[in-house]
Image (cartoon, rainbow, N blue to C red):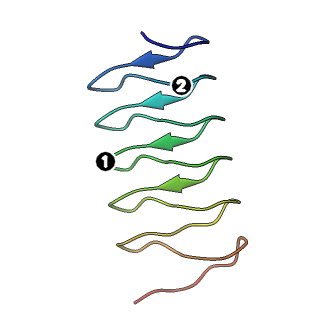
């Protein structure tokens, strides 16, 4: 583990965070506040948002932005992308 407060750093399913976040190659999280960032289905956000290469989300406030089947709203609105 490598963290200021109970976080972990690992190649698979580990965590790296200041406050209970995780950073991992597969399904991990990296965030200041409970967010996640991952290569596959992870999330990266300042406040509970998600950003992912496949089916993930990227938003400042609960929105979503995805390459495949995701949404890209400004503030919680959804946009159906073909």
Query: Where does label 1 land, which residue?
Result: 39
Does dot 2 land on a helix, a strand or a loop?
loop
Quarter-wise, where is residue 53 in the image?
Answer: bottom left
Q: Which quadrant is home to the N terminus?
A: top left
Report x, y in % for residue 48: 64, 47
From the viewer's perspective, is residue 20 above or below residue 69?
above
Instruction: From the viewer's perspective, tell me whether residue 54 is left or right of residue 20.
Output: left
Q: Nearer the viewer, residue 10 or 78?
A: 10
Q: Residue at x 52, y 86 (%)?
A: 80
Mark 2 and mark 1 lie on one chain; the one further toward the N terminus is 2
Query: Where does label 2 land, which residue?
Result: 17
Q: Residues within 10 Å of mark 2 (few under 14, many from 20)?
A: many
Q: CA distance from mark 2 to mark 1?
A: 17 Å
Q: Are the residues flagged by discs 2 and 1 in contact, CB closer than 8 Å?
A: no
Report x, y in % for residue 77: 69, 78
From the viewer's perspective, is residue 67 above or below residue 51?
below
Q: Residue at x 44, y 23 (%)?
A: 15
Report x, y in % for residue 71: 52, 75
Q: Residue at x 35, y 32 (%)?
A: 24
From the viewer's perspective, is residue 6 above or below residue 36?
above
Q: Residue at x 35, y 72 (%)?
A: 68
């Amino acid at each position: 583990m490598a963290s200021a407060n109970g976080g972990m750093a690992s190649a698979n399913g580990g965590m790296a965070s200041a406050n209970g976040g995780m950073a991992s190659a597969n399904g991990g999280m990296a965030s200041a506040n409970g967010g996640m960032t991952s290569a596959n289905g992870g999330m990266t956000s300042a406040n509970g948002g998600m950003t992912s290469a496949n089916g993930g989300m990227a938003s400042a406030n609960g929105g979503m932005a995805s390459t495949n089947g995701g949404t890209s709203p400004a503030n919680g609105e959804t946009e159906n992308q073909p």
